[in-house]
Image (tube, coloured by chain):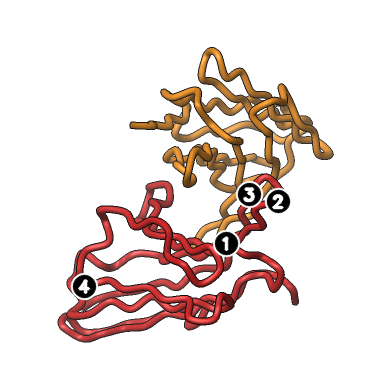
Chain colours: A red, B orange
Amino acid sequence: DTGVSQNPRHKITKRGQNVTFRCDPISEHNRLYWYRQTLGQGPEFLTYFQNEAQLEKSRLLSDRFSAERPKGSFSTLEIQRTEQGDSAMYLCASSLVSSYNEQFFGPGTRLTVL
Amino acid sequence: KQEVTQIPAALSVPEGENLVLNCSFTDSAIYNLQWFRQDPGKGLTSLLLIQSSQREQTSGRLNASLDKSSGRSTLYIAASQPGDSATYLCAVLGGKLIFGQGTELSVKP
C-alpha cells in the first residue's frame, strides 16, 4: 500500500497522560501536514514540514504539542499532559510540492481523553 | 484571514438526482482548491483539485468549478447513488489548507 498510514488508529487515555502518534507519508512526498478534526467540523491545520524542517505552526498548537520529522520521512505528534479538550481525530497528510501540493490524507488517529 | 463556508450543511436527495454543493471563500489569493469526501470515522479522500488558473475539473460523475473573482466553487454530482452518501469538504490552499465545515450528503435509494 503506497498511501499515507497512521498509527495507532484509536487511542484512549486518561487526562494528564502523554500520547504519541505516528504518520508515514507517501514515500516520495516531501511535505507532511498535521490537522485536527472535531465532530461536525472541518479539519484545522496544526503544523507542516518540508523534508525535516518544520515550516509553520498554528496557534492551535500549544506548548503541550510537539511534532517532529527527524529524517524527513515519518513524523510523530506528541501531546503532553492531555486534556479532555484534546479529544479529536488527528489527521496526517502528505504532498509533493511539484504536483500543485495536492494533499493525500491518512485514515486518522481518534484520540479520546477520559 | 481566509474563511471557507459550505452550503448547505446537510442535503438529502433521492437516488438518480443531479446535485450541486457550494463552497465560498473570502480571500481570492489561493494556490488551488480541493474537494474531499469523508466517510464517517474515516480519513479524507481527495476527489478533485482545481489549480487557481483553472475554471473546472472533471472526474467521472463529478465536476468541480472555480470562480476566484467571486470566491466560489461548486461540486456537481451527476446521477447520484446511495454510495455517494458521505460528507463533502472543500478546502483552499494559500500556504496551508483551510477547510469548510462540510456538506453531509445522504442519497436515498
Please report contact status of discs 3 and 1: CB closer than 8 Å, yes or no. yes
- For label 1, the crowd category at 10 Å Cα-Cα, with few meaning under 14, some 14 to 19 and many 20 or more, is many
On whether disc 3 and disc 1 are found on a single subunit, the reply is yes
The amino acid marked with disc number 2 is Ser
Residue at the image point whose x is 33% and y is 78% from the top: A78
The amino acid marked with disc number 4 is Arg
- For label 3, the crowd category at 10 Å Cα-Cα, with few meaning under 14, some 14 to 19 and many 20 or more, is many
Disc 1/disc 4 C-alpha distance (Å) = 23 Å
The amino acid marked with disc number 3 is Asn
Indicate the secondary structure of the residue bearing disc 3: loop
Disc 4/disc 2 C-alpha distance (Å) = 33 Å
- Front-lying residue, B15 or B27: B27
Q: Circle 2 is placed at which residue position?
A: A98
Q: Circle 3 is placed at which residue position?
A: A101
The amino acid marked with disc number 1 is Arg
On whether disc 1 and disc 2 are found on a single subunit, the reply is yes
* Residue B36 point in image, percent of width and height: 60, 46
Question: Reading the chain from its start, which is encountered first: label 4 or label 2?
Answer: 4
Disc 3/disc 1 C-alpha distance (Å) = 8 Å
Residue at the image point whose x is 68% and y is 24% from the top: B65
Q: Circle 1 is placed at which residue position?
A: A31
In which quarter of the view is residue A25 placed? bottom right
Question: Reading the chain from its start, which is encountered first: label 1 or label 4?
Answer: 1
Indicate the secondary structure of the residue bearing disc 1: strand
Please report contact status of discs 1 and 2: CB closer than 8 Å, yes or no. no
